[in-house]
Image: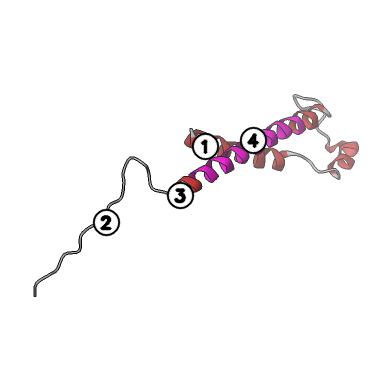
Amino acid sequence: MFTFILALHIIVAIAMIGLILIQHGKGADAGASFGAGSSGTVFGAAGTANFLTRATAVLTVVFFITSMTLAVHARKQAEDQFRLDAPASAPQTPRPMTQHSE
């Protein structure tokens, strides 16, 4: 399960980077009025911005959820790894000291 969430987290991060780089900044709207606009695209002039914004928002929510899930899992792993109490099924008995003859 941890591997699946980690893989999903990496894929979502890469997709977010791609979507953010595709989006135009606020200053790009000024160029659209001089003929450099995207009115001939599949989504129309304003449709692309709405689609990319919504897709980025959805990926951001998924990224946040996977981040929190991975953090909780890592915390549980760390607690299990550094626990000081010994398991009840295996009592620890001291080993007798042996003398070496030289």
Q: Earlier in the sequence, mark 4 or mark 1?
A: 1
Q: Which mark is residue 83?
A: 3
Tell me if 7 is positioned left or right of 98 in this view: right
- What residue is drawn where x is 71% and y is 41%? 20
Q: Which mark is residue 7?
A: 1
Q: Amino acid at mark 2?
A: Pro
Query: Residue tagged by mark 4?
Result: 65
Q: In the image, which is nearer the foreground, mark 4 or mark 1?
A: 4
Q: Earlier in the sequence, mark 4 or mark 3?
A: 4
Q: Amino acid at mark 4?
A: Ile
The C terminus - image quarter: bottom left
Instruction: Count the numbered circles shown.
Output: 4
Relative image position of residue 22 (x, y in whole percent): 71, 39
Q: Amino acid at mark 3?
A: Arg
> Which segment is the magenta one?
53-77
Would you identify the image quadrant in which residue 14 lies? top right
Q: Earlier in the sequence, mark 4 or mark 2?
A: 4
What is the distance, in whole Å, between disc 4 and disc 3 at their CAs? 27 Å
Crowd rating for badge 2 (residues with CA inside 10 Å; few <14, some 14–19, many 20+):
few
Circle 3: element type: loop
